Image: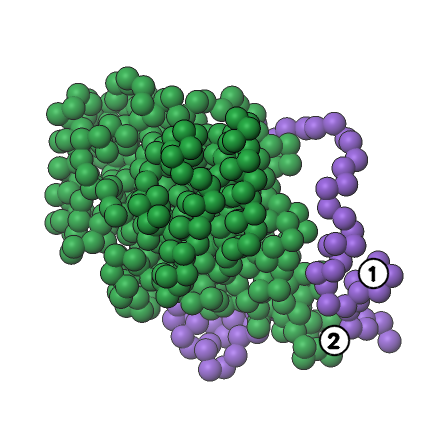
Amino acid sequence: MSELINLSLTDQILGLTDKSFSSKEITGAYLNEIKKKKSLNCFISVFEEESEEKALIADENIAKNKARPLEGIPIAHKDIFCIKDKKTTCGSRMLSNFISPYSSEVFSKLDAAGAVTLGKTNMDEFAMGSSNETSFYGNVLNPINEKLSPGGSSGGSAAAVRANLCSFATATDTGGSIRQPASFCGVTGIKPTYGRVSRWGMIAFASSLDQAGIIAKNAKDAAIALKYMSGFDQKDSTSLNEEVKDLQQEVDADQEHIIGIPKELIENIKNDQVRDSFKNAISILEKDGAKIEEINLPHIEYSLPAYYVIAPAECSANLARYDGIRFGHRSESVSSLEDLYVNSRTEGFGREVKNRIFIGTFCLSAGYYDAFYNKALKIRNLIKSDFDEAFKKVSSIAMPTCSNSSFELGSISDPVEMYEQDIYTIPANLAGLPALSIPSGTADEMPIGLQLIGNYLEEGRILNLANKFQKLTNFHEFK
Amino acid sequence: MKITEQDLKNISLLSKIKIDKETSDSLVEDLESILTMVNKMDEVDTSKINPLTHPIENTQTLREDIEKKDIEREKLQELSKEKDSGFYLTPKVIE
């Protein structure tokens, strides 16, 4: 049955529909593989019995010709999405005992579309990290080379897709947490437009930047999965009340593309292999008929500093809810109410989460608010305006996903060096734009990604371009 | 940018997280290096720019005020270690 797990989502849907194989078989095959590759540490929880039961229901639905769009497809959810009556840890000791009383909209939508949930994937604590090393549950290993990081924060989801432990996985991206691990693991990851996918039941890190998306084997699979995850949700006040386009149709449509290249940024790439691979990818698309235009994004170099004020500021406010009283870790050594707050938080959060809370608290405190937080918001406006200007003449923007391929676990201890992992991915979050990463070559024998950024609600257009690239190349193929 | 001992005390007090003596030196080092990176923002003249708090404007939507019982109170309170008769319990605040 191992060949079933290698199939693309598209082929799995076909095979299930024409009854070449059953959901029971494919679910069983994934569960076996998860057991076999337990040492990768991709999963925080696995729902073995439940997924087998769901697979049987799916097979009945298929037999009765009542199959829903993702009927019987085994998937995994990042452990940031609440699932009713299931442990949802967000990779933290703080939530190690948290059994969610409700389900996230992302889970509910994919569940209603017929997907079988195999389990929940490992991640950096509260999605804060770029290597998966901040998880309370230990880091995930990169399936291509186990000494290396799978990236983060959605490292468990990216590694699970690459190791064939699920058909596709959900993930979240606040500053690059879908695209950077997708790049490191040689898979396809998309963060849609801010507000396209509901944040209801998705544990908050930085609310104006957080967005849920998909990690899949290829652009076509990602388009199908994203289609069934997107849509307006009354329960999320920032959800966009806009029609969900048929991404499945759009990914294969005949579209013309004008790709914007931020020339200065590309010339400043320090890693020769990353720069050469990027230029090669662009020339492949140009030969295929895409028009290439040089663009200017003059304020993009200020994305990283602005992000590391805005994200920690929002994080310090969001994580104030963990007080030890209503849910989450509650300290045992307590003699006053103040002790209860302080000891529960000190014991429950890990070092990186504390660092970000401290930075956010500092930047928002009296005397510093204008110099840091307000300044960062003004720079955010300039970055958004740069993109608005660029999209007047191009239909998408290309740049590398990351300035390097995966690095050795434990090799980066300087926080700023770790933050620089997200130097190319952060701008799309600040502007709220859709962006994806597809494998486009290698550096130091590990995959690197090409990032495509689209205009608002134009997920379909960048997926279409990504699909074109994947038809012309085989960087995304793996067994 | 320098982080003083008083800054550390303030941050700890406001965030309700203890900073112990053993880790405070490396923490100061981390925070100072992050704030130095952040200070690059000063290169940009933003005097005539408005702050942007949110990437997409006009997204706030209203819905009908209809009662929903999606989440049960008992179920929520099961998550707390200390509760009684529908209340959450904390250590005594008033003597």
Label 1 marks a residue whose chain is: B
Q: Name the residue under label 2.
A: A336
The answer to which of B36 and A291 lies nearer the viewer is A291
Label 2 marks a residue whose chain is: A
* Residue A347 in view (yes/no): yes
Chain B colour in the picture: purple
The count of marks equals: 2
* Residue B41 in view (yes/no): no
Q: Do the residues labelled 1 and 2 touch (CB within 8 Å)?
A: no
Does A227 sit above or below residue A369?
above
The answer to which of A126 and A68 lies nearer the viewer is A68
> In this rendering, would A153 be left or right of B68?
left
Q: Name the residue under label 1.
A: B87
> In this rendering, would A47 be left or right of A138?
right
Q: Where is residue A395 in the image (x, y as percent from the top left)?
A: 30, 23
What element does badge 1 sit on?
Answer: strand
Image chain in green: A
Q: Which residue is drawn at 28% across and 23% down?
A: A394
Q: Where is residue A263 in the image (x, y as percent from the top left)?
A: 19, 35
Q: Which amino acid does label 2 sit on?
A: Ser
What element does badge 2 sit on?
Answer: loop
Q: Residue at x 22, y 50 (%)?
A: A447
Q: Which colour scheme is used?
A: by chain
For disc 2, the neighbor class at 10 Å (few under 14, some 14 to 19, many from 20) is few
> In this rendering, would B45 be left or right of B75?
left
Report how far apart the C-alphas of labels 1 and 2 lie in the structure.
18 Å
Q: Which amino acid does label 1 sit on?
A: Phe
